[in-house]
Amino acid sequence: MERQTKANLYALATVLCWATVGTAFKIALRFVNYVQLLFWSVLVSLIVFAIILSIKKLWQKLLEQSKTDILKSAIIGFISPFVYYLVLFQAYDLLPAQEALTVNYMWPIVLVLLSIPILKQKISFLNILSIFISFLGCFIIVSKGKVFDLEFSNSFGVFLAILSTFIWSIYWLFNVKDKRNEIVKLFMSFLFGFLFISLYSIFTDNLILPERNGLLAVTYVGIFEMGLTFFLG
């Protein structure tokens, strides 16, 4: 298969995963709370990455990591999947899917803004105008067109969704500077993320095995909305 064709297929698969993210999260949250959803979906994603590591025969690269690499993975794993998805899943729990999804998709805009001080990127007037229009569009959606009334279905949920965009952007900026193999990085970050969410679940009494429908839902989220999206993206 040609390189460009493979890239196009990966891009299409990523779009399909992202396109169903809101629906998948809301369905899963019918059967489990946001903490349980994070625990089980991260566990499933970790298994997915372990399988990919085995297929690609990359386990040896795990042993070749330095202490600095492991520390980076611990930091990245704390940011995402732990904190990012903890915040995002709670936002989806409080908001209609279309609102949470729209606000969360502001992360590319936030990423551009953060890249200015962090990566020393320069943006043009047209970039600034595009950012303003994008922010305005998101605001119109979450306010249901009542721009001047400032009425939201759940203000705290909107705050969490906005916060998630900053967390994801910080994760991306941290991750882009890490030049290790992508699968190794993903496995390590999800391994640490799983440790963090396990401890959090224990302390919050959320270490509970879901019923059958709940297990199916978190498995779907873990494979398609977290595992494959990270891998393909």
Image (cartoon, rainbow, N blue to C red):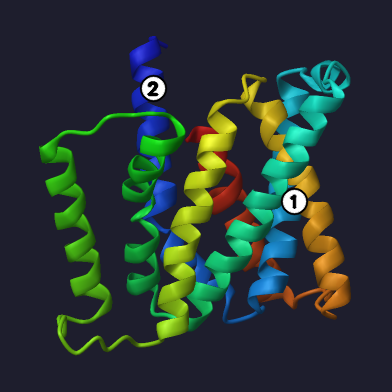
Give the residue at x 47% y 46%: 169
Q: Which residue has dot 2 on it?
A: 7
Instruction: State whether residue 204 is above or below residue 100.
Output: below
Element type at mark 1: helix
Answer yes or no: is residue 22 visible: yes
Answer yes or no: is residue 26 visible: no
Q: In front: 197, or 21?
A: 197
Name the amino acid, label 2. Ala
Q: In front: 205, or 121?
A: 121
Which label sits on residue 117? none
Q: Which residue has dot 1 on it?
A: 193
Give the residue at x 84% y 20%: 66
- Residue 70 picture quarter: top right
Residue 160 place in picture, x, y as percent? 49, 71
- Residue 29 picture quarter: bottom right
Residue 141 place in picture, x, y as percent? 22, 73
Q: In front: 135, or 54?
A: 135
Residue 156 place in picture, x, y as percent? 47, 82
Instruction: State whether residue 173 is above or below residue 160.
Output: above
Dot 1, how many residues are within 10 Å of its Cα: few (below 14), some (14-19), or many (20+)? many
Name the side, left or right, on which 3 lies relative to 93. Answer: left
Instruction: State whether residue 58 is above or below residue 12.
Output: above
Give the residue at x 68% y 48%: 45
Name the side, left or right, on which 59 lies relative to 110. Answer: right
Closest to the camera, between mark 2 and mark 1, is 1
Give the residue at x 72% y 27%: 184
Name the amino acid, label 1. Gly
Q: Quadrant of the N terminus?
A: top left
Q: Earlier in the sequence, mark 2 or mark 1?
A: 2
